[in-house]
Amino acid sequence: MTAFRLASGGSAIDRARRLSFSFDGRMVEAYAGDTIASALLAADIAVVGRSFKYHRPRGIWGAGVEEPNALIDVAGNRHGAPNTRATTEPARDGLITRSVNASPNAAADRNAFLDRFARFIPAAFYYKTFMWPDWHLFEPRIRAMAGLGSVDPDWKSVGPADQINKHCDVLVVGAGPAGLAAARSASDIGKSVILVDDQPHPGGSLLHRDAEIDGQPAANWIDGSIAALRQGGHLVLTSTTAFGIYDHNLIGLNQRHHDGRPDTLWRIRPGRIVLATGAIERPLPFANNDLPGILSADAALIYLRRYGVLVGRQIVVVTNNDSAHEVAAALAAAGAEVTLVDPRMDSRLTVSANIRRLGGRTVTTARGRMRVEGVTLDDGTSLPADCVVVSGGWTPTVHLFCQARGKLAWDESRAAFLPGDPVDGITVTGAAAGTVALSEVFADVAKAAFGVAGTSSPRSTGPEASGAIMPTWPRAGAKGRVWIDYQNDVTAKDVELAARENFISVEHLKRYTTLGMATDQGKTSNLAGLALMANITGRTVPEVGTTTYRPPFTPVPLTSFSGALGGELMAPVRRLPLENMHRAAGAVFQEYGGWLRPAHYGGADAEAAIQSEALGARRSVALFDGSTLGKIEVMGPKAAEFVDFIYYNTMSTLKPGRCRYGFMLSENGVVFDDGILIRLDEHRFIVSCSSSHVTAVHARLEEWRQDRFGRDAVYIHNATADMATLTVSGPKAKALVAALDLGVSLDDGELPHMAIASGIFGNEAVRVARVSFTGDRSYEISIRADRAEALWVVMQEAGKAFDAVTIGLEAMTLLRAEKGYIVIGKDTDGTTMPHDLGVDGPRQKRGTDYVGRRSLFTDVATAERRLQFVGLRVTDGEALLATGTHAIAKVEGSVRSQGFVTSSYQSPTLQRPIALALIERGASRHGETIDLQHLGILRRATITGPCAFDPTGERLNA
Amino acid sequence: MTRRYSALSLFREGLANQTGWEPAWRSPQPRKTYDVIVIGGGGHGLSTVYYLARNHGITNVAVLEKGWIGGGNTGRNTTVVRSNYYYPESVALYGLAHRLYENLSGEINYNVMLSQRGMVTLCHSVAEMEIAARLVNAMQINGTDAELFSVEDVRRVLPNYNFAPDARFPVLGGVWQGRAGTARHDAVAWGYARAASRLGVDIIQNCEITDFIIEGGRCRGVETTRGAIRANRIGMAVAGHSSVLAAKAGFRLPINSYALQACVSEPVKPVLDTVVLSPGTGVYVSQSDKGEIVLGGALDRVPSYGQRGNLPTLESVIAGLLEMFPSFGQLKLMRQWAGIVDVVPDSSPIIGESPLPGLFLNCGWGTGGFKAIPAGGTLLAHLLATGRHHDISRPFDLDRFTTGRLLDEAAGSGIAH
Amino acid sequence: MQLFPCPFCGPRPETEFHYNGEAGNIRPDGAQVSAECWAGYLYERSNPKGAAREIWVHATCQEFFVMERDTVTHQLAATQTPGFAEHAE
């Protein structure tokens, strides 16, 4: 028994509330307020995990986010997560936890043998071996060994994480003395403040270090400050980590909850950022400095003061700076036998009489196997110990400052990188800026941040910390294994190896040795690694420099980022005004180009339903919801000139009341969209583009309007969602529309194919357009979307007399394929030009400019070997061709593709398969039989024109 | 000094405390002139100088790197190696790279950890299945390996995938390439550097190009932060910054620079064996040999040279991942970063002589340059050695933007590469 | 998350905007334009590292505008309100 819980003390725990959880199958007693780590320490569980590579036994090092060793898997849906830091995870009753990377458990890991082979598997050894006979023979075993914690495949989300956006005048990161003082002074001058701290309690170092403010215990000042901030309406977020500063000074915060809710992501946009992020204690470089029972001095003090846990009975405190002297005194006062080892002969702080003090010396080696048993000093002295408490100095937490493109400056006297030239909108203060003594911290805050007359600054009236330090870095050639990166098992020898092999750039050092790439991202190790590299290569520490600081500061749950962005919200579908009616009619919905539309109606057998709908459409009349069709109005004095420029086809010659089919090209000459243009009057058109292109077409129209024609010349309004379009198509279409009594003359002389008329349904204006996508006589009736339901009901009712069928998009797509009408993006690809589709007139004849024109005359546009739009016919009785089948030809001994099938259906009308294709020189090869290949199977088919049904178009007027 | 890497040499060095290894590459002072210099010490630049020496015997060569080798996109990408392309020209290019990768570790005596655990590109709709069939047929005809996967096949390789019937992006099947996989990106850079250095190539780091030396309308060398360096032929492979150097050389390129972000989770025990790409979520993901889930998505929306991540893209990529693998909701993000990529209108690379004679280009790889490193190097080396195109690089010349002979995989196959 | 100033709507998050090309890329009209000139318009870009002048569209209101910003630091310099004609003849 070494570490234990004292009979009293511990400001964070509530001794009245006992709880227990399991760790590696063993029950651990704890108090409310404990972390998993403090409870494990109180239970004297020294080995809490295994290192990544050598499976070294490892104990708790720290008491916060910097912890490299104590990672655990937590089970369950509510709190469950792999690789959870025991030092920041609250102990909860009934929690099931286990160590990571250990099997069966941390104390007895069957892979521990690897450490004995460590000399043969140094940094980056894997680049040098496993090549013969083949990496694939070795990799599966290595993969199985890798990773730390385990994912529970049955884990289920308990709900989406909240994401909150907020503005404030001042965001203060860190609620230690500097942050609290800064927040209060910002509040005093009327700023709105958000104060965040990653610990559950504000106060930072004041929670465990000796301090007195304004003549009172620090705790009073903390409580008073927090109360004042909350009273002032400011937001104080604890258990919240500022993990990243992004462009335009947006800060990301991750807030942990203690009730099982997913963490919350805060996106804060402050006017000003104060970084009072403190500093992180470093280890000291001596052999076996990774043994369980060796921990950070500051952590030892935290466990003592906050959790009432004394980390050992026979403790050696090793330090190179003044900050650990206070720790030594506190441990001794708590009853431990303490020896203080400090290489400095005359460090100015005196320590209490009951401490054995060994000045001018330091530790070279720690002894022990599963936990530390003693240390040896550089003069050969051997000291027994059940715990070694270490302070190698402090590394200011400058991560956020660097993420915001801040540059660091090396301070030799403090042996630390400090923030260099200021970054706009960001102030760094307190220990993060290298200021240690409380009075200096307060003075700094007053001066740097909000030192406006009239604000009161707190005064330090108690003991003052000292930053005096004798820098101690790992040295080349040291005996034994000096650990630098605990989690990733990087030793000083690995750094030496990297240097020997010319991996001397700090970024190469990181990647070659994996130094700083573990889940702690090198918070305790990076500086020692680069200082050693500096030493080996004869450079200074700043010459070696740091690696780039990247977000997040600490690992953030993926669920915080995804928030509610899941399921349909990930990519919302667009819905038809009549969706509910279609559902009631038994429609089966599918997503097409972002719209949720009826694929077909009723029946488990989709293919049969589609065939029956298509057949009905040809025999009698079909009703179809075409509301997704684009309806973009173009109006203004230059509207006609505008549509001429936008379309491949000349449109200005269109007469009012008439429609014309046309292509829109991209500037690279490729067909971007096809559709009908309706001319309502001299200066007013409706662009009826295809459903999935409405947004993009609208954007293009706006671009050319604003950038070429002028805002006064043309005005554009996208009315797609305002109007529903209901289509009547088939031999009995005219009769059915007549029965609707829309007040429109259906006489073919007055309303011929490709003409429009205005009618009325009830009190509602409707527009009737005679355009057809089926090849049969068709009427598209457009009406205000919110009145469409009544019209649809009447159409359904009237349809009964004509054996009308309601068809879904699949049948419509089939019908148009019988006619050889294209669907852009299906029957064309990103290289198809209008002349590939048989529409060459405008290219040959138009004299005015239009979008994409010049591209129709490039080498490739005029090349002979272009893919052209055709039909394909298989021998009667043969099966359908699969869409995606390629045409193949043997050229110079090798097979190559000559195009592919774009659409393929069983035609119920023709009672044979039909297919559309893009085939090399296809337009001039009608009648030719070609070879086809699909998934290795060869077929043959004959090239035809695209239109398989009613080639003369008689049915348009039948 | 130990030169050769093997299990045996590792064992011997283990007995000697690993003290006998020689530097992986030399770092000499730059000479005043070389036969050939290559600007850019990333994967493409390093493989170029290696193949110049190996294939063409040209060893009076230097590669000039602004920072540290492999520090650009080579060290920032998600390490996928594949050749599942649509057009024969693309298959020839990426197929060459894929084959060279398969023998690379042995050839350069450096384990680049090519891990061919396969890649599946998912299909979320009937339309996507049809396009997938078109793609698979093209690949089979063009001589690369591909299979059309049914949903059952996908289930077999991705047991943790979200096959719920109400999933936002249901899976109907996919395109499978069994030879695809990942390689260790740093190892590719370092392995080529070591092999090239041994063949006599000078690897010059911390050497930034400040200007080109142009005489008689021809590029004769470069001014650098380490002095003027002259050469008969100059190659450049500086993905992300191609336009910046082109401006110094006096021409413009059909390139926009964008940040492409990637991120990794904390390492966990194996949960994902293959590489997965979902067009619906825009996410591609694999699990590294170290156990991290390696995640990439779409380009950022804003043209940028800022090599750093942001929140909007990260959030949508992660949301996409959790849509695909709900149980990954237990994981935490460990690190996010970004690389700057050359985005070309047809998303195919540009290889060929630049408008400035004597200066040869290897650029425009967009988001997919890593997988092409061995081919990019082979082809640029061929150009630098002979002054003429290799058959495989000819279609990728800059002149395609004038002739209109673009090689847009997304246009042809409907799947963005 | 960058904040872009839409001349019509004010500052809005970057996700609402689309990049629409470099400002000053004048469209050469006509069928007689040389292939090189047309390719230049279609494809060649300055792609500056640092100060850039770009056309953006605020997708939610369809306002096109010119924005000057730094492509490395992402600092905004200025936006030009409606009425520009960067492609005009």
Image (tube, rainbow, N blue to C red):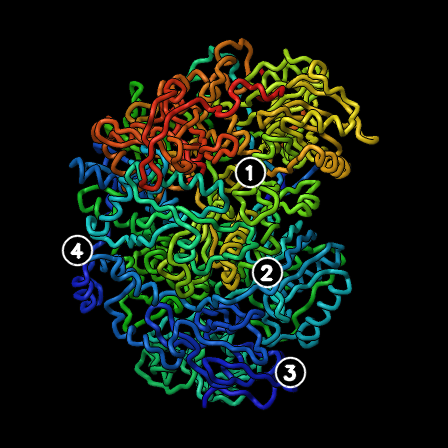
Pointer 3 local density, CA inside 10 Å: few below 14, some 14–19, many at least 20: some
Q: Nearer the viewer, mark 2 or mark 1?
A: 1
CA distance for labels 1 and 3: 67 Å
CA distance for labels 3 and 4: 62 Å
Q: What kind of residue is marked 4?
A: Arg
Labels 1 and 4 share a subunit: no
> What residue is shown with label 2?
A254
Labels 4 and 2 share a subunit: no
Along the polypeptide, which appears first: circle 2 or circle 1? 2
> What residue is shown with label 3?
A14
**Secondary structure at numbered mark 2:** strand
**Secondary structure at numbered mark 4:** loop
Q: What kind of residue is marked 1?
A: Glu
Q: Nearer the viewer, residue A953 or A432?
A: A953
Labels 3 and 2 share a subunit: yes
> What residue is shown with label 1?
A810
* Residue B229 on image: x %, y %: 27, 33
**Secondary structure at numbered mark 3:** strand
Where A393 sits versus B27, above or below? below
* Residue B337 on image: x %, y %: 46, 50
Q: Nearer the viewer, residue A554 or A547?
A: A554
Q: What kind of residue is marked 3?
A: Asp
CA distance for labels 2 and 1: 47 Å
Residue, x 33% and y 36% (percent of image)?
A933
